[in-house]
Image: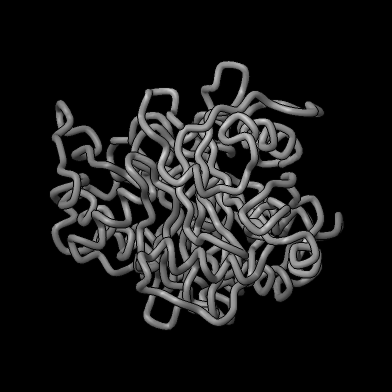
Amino acid sequence: MTGPDGAELAGIASVPVRGGDDELAQLLGPFLARQDWAQSALGIVGAKSVPVRLVDAAVLRPGRPGLASVVVDAGERFDCRLHVLLGWRSLPQATAALLRPGAVVGTGEDADGEVLLYDALADGELCLELLAAASSGREHAIRSRVVQSLVSHSALVYDERLFMKCYRVIERRQRPEIEMMMRLDEVGFNHLLAPVAHWARGAFDLGLVREFLPGAVEGKALALTSLRDLLARSGTSEDASSFEEVGLAGGDLGDEMRRLGHTTAELHLALAEAFGLRPRPGGEAGSEIRIHGDYHLRRVMRVETGWLVAGFGDDPLIGPRAGAGSQGEPRTAVPLEDVADLFLSLRQVADEAAALQPASTLAHALVLAEGWVRHNRSSFLRGYLEAADIAQLVPQGRVEVDTWLEERVAARWSV
């Protein structure tokens, strides 16, 4: 069979459907209409089926149980490219193997008779096969678990040492996460969860395997712990101790923010090396580089060796550009844009924690939270500006940098 561009589709002949590509497309239409992630990608709710056209398919494991990777164009204009992992077994075997309801695609037939087609991620054995296929046979595991997610990828953890993103929404360009992680790894930036394998077929980025660190603590969790400790020790009266009196002991986050600032500067220097830089006219706020673009406390993690940066690239199903997401051009800007995002994140976490206080202590909690934000922003910026060679990317005048960041954070907070 051939795809929409006239090219022969690899492997489709081995997918056990009686009527070939037409029947497979007909089976996938109702299946995709039931999936939350596909509904988000297609902008539909309540449809019984969606138009589907086969683009590419490859059988990763023939026989029973079988496994195939199928790429389709879906929607009224066939303008949304989706990735389905298809598994099959005999009906009795499938009934025993499937781990969750709602995974069934339909029935098919192979040389040995009727089979049930289903979402392969509902089959523990096929999840293990998927790791081997995605890593070209270099990686194998004994155990796997699927991490539930409604975003544009399925997430799996293998033996608590590897993490795999299997992309469900296929982008028309190289996926920014792949591009960023691989290029940063090439230039020696090691403050990230190291990429282990990149799964692609032709022009399609299908998945990413990286290391998994069970002990990693998300930056937001550390920040909330610090704030809760501060507010718990602040007293109950409105004229209780100031932030400077109670905030710099116990749960103080300042040293960690200084380390994170230094790591962020190293990230920006690595991005400049990996993607190049260009001066801004007049030198306003420094040079422009390829930036992280969505840099906040949930994008960083603390491990024993220091801070790690994660979450490269916008998810196509999340945010103001949902439905397009990172399918646009990569974001190039001054590095301080990432710093402004992190500062805004500190403000959001502070307000979130203070809002949980009872009315009797809310006013004082807000004062303390404001002090916590100022202290941690200052610590972060001190670590950032102390990094060697960062002067080639950002202005070195502390007042100039502070003023620029205050304006950016205020503008974003008002949106």
Q: Residue 396 at what x, y percent from top left? A: 20, 49
Is residue 241 shown left or right of residue 66?
right
Residue 228 vs 203, above or below: the answer is below
Residue 315 vs 269, above or below: the answer is above
Q: Residue 168 at what x, y percent from top left? A: 55, 45
Q: Residue at x 72, y 39 (%)?
A: 31
Query: Is residue 23 in view?
Result: yes
Quadrant of residue 247 within the rendered picture: bottom right
- Which part of the image, by quadrant, shows the C terminus? top right
Q: Nearer the viewer, residue 61 or 297?
A: 61
Q: Residue 311 at what x, y percent from top left? A: 46, 54
Q: Nearer the viewer, residue 40 or 123?
A: 123
Is residue 359 shown left or right of residue 10?
right
Is residue 121 shown left or right of residue 69?
right
Q: Residue 231 at what x, y percent from top left? A: 70, 68
Q: Nearer the viewer, residue 95 or 170?
A: 95
Query: Is residue 400 in view?
Result: no
Q: Residue at x 20, y 55 (%)?
A: 269
Is residue 92 shown left or right of residue 197?
right
Q: Residue at x 51, y 63 (%)?
A: 130
Q: Nearer the viewer, residue 338 or 324?
A: 324
Q: Residue at x 36, y 70 (%)?
A: 259
